[in-house]
Amino acid sequence: MEPMNRRKLLISAASIGGVGALAWYASRTATMKSMPGMDMAGGDMPGMNMGNASEKGGRVRELPTGSALPEIPRLKNDSGIAGNFIAQLEAATASHSFVPGLVTPVLAYNGSVPGAMIEVYEGDQLSIAFKNSIPGQASTIHWHGLDIPADQDGNPTHPVESGTGRTYAFTIPAGSAGSYWYHPHPHGLTAEQVYRGLAAPFIVRSKNDPLDAKLGDTVLFVSSISLNSDGTIAENTAADRFNGREGDHVLVNGAKQPVLSVQPGASRRYRIYNATNGRYLRIALDGHKMTLVGTDGGLLAAPIRNLEEILLAPAERAEVVIDFQNKTGRFALNSMPYERGWMGRDKPAATILPLMTFEVAGASVSSIAVPEKLRDIAPLGEPASVKRIVLNETMGMANGAMTMEFLIDQKSFDMNRVDLRSKVGEVELWEISNTTDMDHPLHIHGTQFQVVEREINGSKKPQSFLAWKDTVNIVSKEIVRLKVRHSLPGLRMYHCHILEHEDNGMMGQLDVV
Ligand code: C2O
Ligand code: CU
Ligand code: CU
């Protein structure tokens, strides 16, 4: 196994003074990650199996590109009362056309892929009647990132059986304005239901947004799709199950490489979601820098300017402001190569992948400043207790094939086991150590946390800015320390948000009492 090299950090340090602050976005080069001397041939064993040579025959290789960026439809609020949001969501099979002439059976919320965006204000009361019409599969709706009661949060322990329904009711906490999302969370079926189409943005707004409304506010919801040549969605391959499904085609708001027009000189606000099961997005815009204004749980305390790239692991979100220059032309928003560790065959080539194009054209407009201060974020104080969590992988051989499991603290997820206990309102320090050969984005339900430090090879880098996060990427061999506090009691999940890893068992249960 070759050593991992930390590559030079790729963000301009100018505005935040010091390299330590940048560690969060650090990228790296690493080689390794196929196991020399191990036969990765097929077999049929429990756990995950490396499988046979490429299973990717008979796929749709081209999708139409270049359409205007689709706007994600809003979920209609059936309530006439201010502060109330009442709606219905049905998960069901639907038909979608990704390629002219081919019909793709998908799973969709209310018939649309991605699902309709929920847009509410802090303090709003929601009541969402969910109907599961997915044939033969239980489902749930999980409100990713929101601090809401555990019994309303779509845990796998509260399945909604096929053909039945339930209502999710909760109130949006004050101060939680941010970019959340919703997706299914049934035991063992999350990855499949998401890659078949069930996921959507959930925006919480503040009545006092410090950013100028003239910046606009555009969601860029990144997902992916793999299609068989008959139009059906491809099943996961062994490579998908091991590494997380990256998808053959990356979509923004459901379209491949769409185009968004902006005026020269304009400043625009975007919320970028990584809603893929397992693809890392190292986002960079040709010829432009970005200002990071927010993370998973909303705005930063202060903007971080002049970023050349932003890494979004699966499930992470970033709010950015882009100042387009006074120069017309077409600029690609790309995902740059990122070495996140790859197990087995079918490692994708390290290429620059265009996600979408900004077309800068028309009359010039003047830019809009992002204020120096966005909001107050109080640091979570001294921790009352410490939790240490270790991400593990095990490899085995069975019938001449390699098998693999992804675990937390050497355990595979068990719905009937409580792994950790916490006290309501108590600040804890979590130390999460990734002993595996790949990166894993760790997600904790029902709260937002603050990353405080990253350590790799004994060298520690404090996180020098405050941000609310619900998912944090943990690089192979890295230790991440974060502070977290749960405000509500109940059973919460923590897991790798590479959804294939979650389904494979890389998940635990935290009982907050
Ligand atoms: Cu977005 Cu437990 O998930
Ligand atoms: Cu979640
Ligand atoms: Cu993982």
Image (cartoon, grey):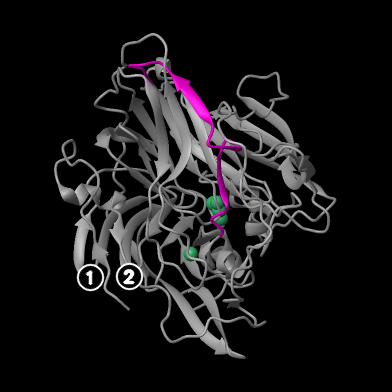
Q: Quadrant of residue 34?
A: bottom left
Marks 1 and 2 close (CB-CB < 8 Å): yes
Q: Nearer the viewer, residue 433 or 8?
A: 8
Quadrant into which the N terminus falls: bottom left
Quadrant of residue 416 in the image? Answer: bottom right
Q: Is residue 91 above or below residue 427?
A: above
Q: Which residue position is annotated with label 2?
A: 477
Residue 403 shown left or right of residue 189 in the figure: left
Mark 1, secondary structure of its residue = loop
Examine the rendered structure and indicate whether residue 314 appears above or below residue 11: below
How busy is the neighbourhood of tag 1: few (under 14 within 10 Å), some, or many (20 plus)? few
Name the spot of residue 313 as percent of width and height, x first.
43, 52
Which mark is on residue 457? Answer: 1
Judging depth in this view, the residue of 311 and 127 nearest the camera is 311
What's the residue at 62%, 81% (across, down)?
42
Q: Position of residue 375 (x, y in %)?
A: 32, 30
| Percent x, y of residue 121 | 53, 27
Q: Which residues are magenta?
A: 245-267
Judge whether residue 176 can be spotted in this image: no
**98 on left or right of 206:** right
Q: Is residue 4 above or below residue 18?
A: below
Query: Residue 500 versus residue 56: which sits nearer the camera?
Result: 56
* Disc 1 from disc 2: Cα separation: 8 Å
Ligand 3 lies under 8 Å from the Cβ of mark 2: no
Work out whether 509 lies above or below 318.
Answer: below
The amino acid pointed to by label 1 is: Asn
What residue is rendered at 74% in x and 47% in y?
Answer: 106
